[in-house]
Image: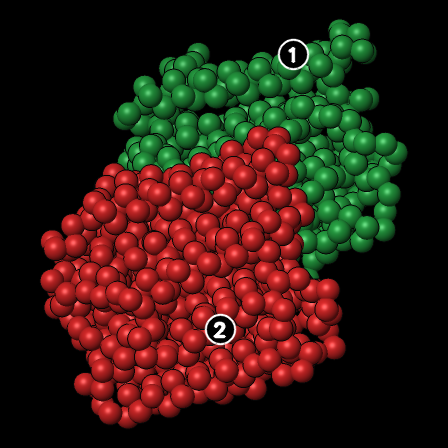
Chain colours: A red, B green
Amino acid sequence: MTTLLIVLPLAAALIVWLLPLNPVSAGALALLAALVEVGVWIQMVVRYDFAAGGLQFSERRSWFSDLDVSYHVGVYGFSVWLIGLTVVVMAATIAYAFWVGRERVRAYMGLMLFLTGAVVGVFSAQDLLLFYAFFEAMLIPLYVLIGVWGGPGRMGATLKFIIYTMAGSLLMLAAIVVYGLSQNTFDLVKIGESSSQWIFLGFVAAFAIKSPLFPLHGWLPDAYRESPPEVAAVLSGVVSKAGAYGFLRIAVAKFPDPAHDFRVPILALAAIGLIYGSLLAFRAPDLRGVIAYSSLAQMGLITMGVFAVNDLGLDGSVLQMVNHGLVSATLFLLAGMVERRTLTGELGRLGGMARGRPALATVLITTGVIALAVPLSSAFAGEFLILAGIFQRGWGWALAGAVAIVLAAMYVLRLISAVLHREVGPAVSDAALDLRPAELGVTVPLVACLLALSVWPAAISEHSFRGDHGGADVASQFK
Amino acid sequence: MIPRPQVDWFALAPVNALLLATGLALLCAVLVPRPWRKGVAASLCALGYAVAFGFAVALYVRSAHGQGVVADAFRRDRLAQLATMIVAGSGLLSVGLSYRERAREDHAAEYYSLLAAAGAGMAFFVAANNLMTLFLALEWFSISLYILCAIDRDRLGGLEAALKYLVIGSFGSAVLLFGSALVYGSSGRLDFPGIAAAGGEHDALLVFGLAMIIAGLAFKASAAPFHMWTPDVYEGAPTPVTAFMAAATKTVALVVMLRVLVTAFPTTADLWTVAIAVIAVCSLVVGNFAALVQRNVKRMLAYSSISHAGFMLIAVSADSLLGARALLYYLIPYGAMSIGAFAVVAARERELGVPVTFENMAGFGWERPLLGISMWAFMLGFAGFPLTGGFVGKFYVFAAAYRHGSTWLVIVGVLATLVSLYYYLGLVRAMFMRRTEDLQLAPIGGSPPRDAWLQGSVVVCLVVTVGTFFAVQPLIDLAKHASAGLPF
């Protein structure tokens, strides 16, 4: 079943690339594949035994035996939710791209499907080399998606993006080689813990850049601004979670001693990123800047939850990964919809879009309110758990988190008022339509997921780790 | 009467098949009427390579235990046969590339004859078991390649390339010969096991000889600092010849280097592992940094081939079974990627009629999707991205280096890979992310002719590049059996 989840989008990508379909049928086929993927994932949720927890649906076949590398995939409770985030967001973004009508549809859709398969692979790989292969494979479609379909500054953005991420990945490759050979296996389940700080730092470099963690976020603003909106949605909503997942699955679980030794510096960087990102989001002059920097802040918060390494922090970080994924994907898609109508993302030239556009206003405000973690929202549950978890590691960290939540309220409200309220901006014409049914069809399911999670955040927070004891699960290295 | 050694003709079958093809192709030049000449000569050459490949496979299967043949001058073992298979495969693909090369019309028969002769020399070279056959075989295929570089007499670049290759290549051969003489002087033996048995540990004469042999082979493998000829020759030679040189010459030079060092010089392993590691690092540094500033695609690929020599030398310097496996595995996707990349360059060259630069690759990916996507895969493979065999190759090389205790080589390799991304992805960027309108040159009249042979070769290369990522186990088994005969 796990293999099916990985192979289905890859196979669909090949079909879309190879068959000479017309644009409409290529897009429809891609959308269909993405929806089938969601269906398969729902099957997985239904059949996953959350009471037992642990690795399920695992499949293992030897890839090359002399170094004990295998094709080993399987899912844990938290990977189920991250895969769910992936397939839902990918379906929404593919649908949006289909509706917008990108040039060279077959290439575009194929790449999006390929990306889906790669991300699902990252979240389910149980072999270090396989994990690395999927981790890198994500980069290939992203590089092209930004480089070909991106905005005017796309060349610089892709170059920066690729150099940053590859620098991290290659350090991770060196770490993987050393770690795997010293343990005589590359199987993530079998491999024992290591106390080497260098190997740990190799992994952390890759995940910290992918997340990103302050001060390794140099690629972020350009990549998020120059991408097509749906690619930015995937990048911040889904791909950044690969970094946080790596922290959880590998860095914290396999390197307990180094993770303990480096906890303070990593938490400090995360906290700085959280505050700094929030402040930048508050000052950013454009829509995407606000979302991009808020993404930096949120990833800092999630990293804090992971490195708290206790039940509350881990539960909270998994919940918040899903929340933030859905929120930032929705916001980027909405930003794209606003930019389509106004041809600009500058907040100074927007404004007053709520009047006569009730659907846009409702969707944006709902998402925004969840993003600023208003009580009873799913983000509130996630952030609260993280803060409670990190409080056990020192009240100062929790204080930083609490300050950031206040800042989050400030930047989200600024975003909402700059787009929807105030007087009508120069870029907003009266003819700009409200959200079309198709656009609602893309965003409403995402918002509905968020609302469902707000009603029952425990669906994720209590169903991510074995026996709902994240700390014990990590301490046992998810065996 | 001089006693004649027992000759195992089966062991020589791949070489003889190619020699036969050489002779028959040359006869075509006089016996076959002009309109059919190119086709017949090319088919004979391809047939020769195919038969050689078949014989190499048969020999591989039936040579589980290596043995010396023809008075121990020649080694019948799986290492030689695996290398012969790679050479024969490269040769076959090069024939596909060459078929539509415009300038091929007048000296077609000679061209294919020489191409087969070079392959025969290489098949002999990898099986050489003493310094004499080693040198003879080296000259045999080198001379064929010198002429192949210059076969387009109207192309000034080709003549310049051939002259450079001739002068510097002869210098390399002379160094190798001198080194062989010194080793012979020190050990009194020509055959590799004999030299090892004579075992003059750190005898000055032997060490100097060893150093010169390494230098001579490094010339052929185009490893820095013996690489000076590479960019000019790769740029000037006809592109199919460049493709063949990049894949086959490098393969045989590295395989022979592995064989000579491991079988003949085990007593000085502490010296040569360091020397090879230093050469590897030089190649990685020179190759990658010089490639950064290239605008001509063939020159960029030339520097990239220097840096790949560096990667493969890391595997040689590990002096272990794992290292040998890494090298032999690496050569397979590397050969496919090199030939494929040069094939795409050749296609573009034929379209434009000018040297291919990054600028005039603009929009190529969208105009010719098959070639564009293949080139993309080759570049990703060179850069060691997953979904290509280049990734697994690099991984094995790093694993071998780490097992040998040289973690620093892993770090150097990783940094070199990072630098290399700039120019490999730069080419992808040029092909896909710039519009055709940016292109200042108009193609030379009409749409390019369909070239099924070239496209077929590219597809084969693509399949090998991607397939080696998935089928690692069988290839590693192949490499494992091939390296099992080496005395580690």
Instruction: Report x, y in % for residue A175.
Output: 33, 63
As drawn, the label of residue B449 is none
Dot 1, how many residues are within 10 Å of its Cα: few (below 14), some (14-19), or many (20+)? many
Taking B326 as reference, is B61 above or below it? above
Of B295 and A432, the residue lying toward us: A432
Q: Which residue is mark 1?
A: B24
Residue B178, can we see it? no
Dot 2, how many residues are within 10 Å of its Cα: few (below 14), some (14-19), or many (20+)? some
Task: Kindly identify the residue that appears in the image at 44 percent across and 17 percent down.
Answer: B55
Mark-to-mark CA distance, 1 and 2? 81 Å
Circle 1 chain:
B
Task: Kindly identify the residue that appears in the image at 61 percent across and 23 percent down.
Answer: B116
Q: Amino acid at mark 1?
A: Leu
Quadrant where the image shows the N terminus of chain A: top left
Instruction: Report x, y in % for residue B47.
Output: 57, 15
Of A451 and B475, the residue lying toward us: A451
Are the residues flagged by discs 1 and 2 in contact, CB closer than 8 Å?
Answer: no
Q: Which residue is mark 2?
A: A365
Q: Is residue A412 left or right of residue B376?
A: left
Instruction: Report x, y in % for residue B175.
Output: 56, 48
Residue A335, can we see it? yes
The answer to which quarter of the image holds residue A143 is bottom right
Task: Kindly identify the residue that appears in the image at 54 percent across and 29 percent down.
Answer: B460
Q: Amino acid at mark 2?
A: Ile
Q: Is residue A126 left or right of residue B223?
A: left
Circle 2 chain:
A
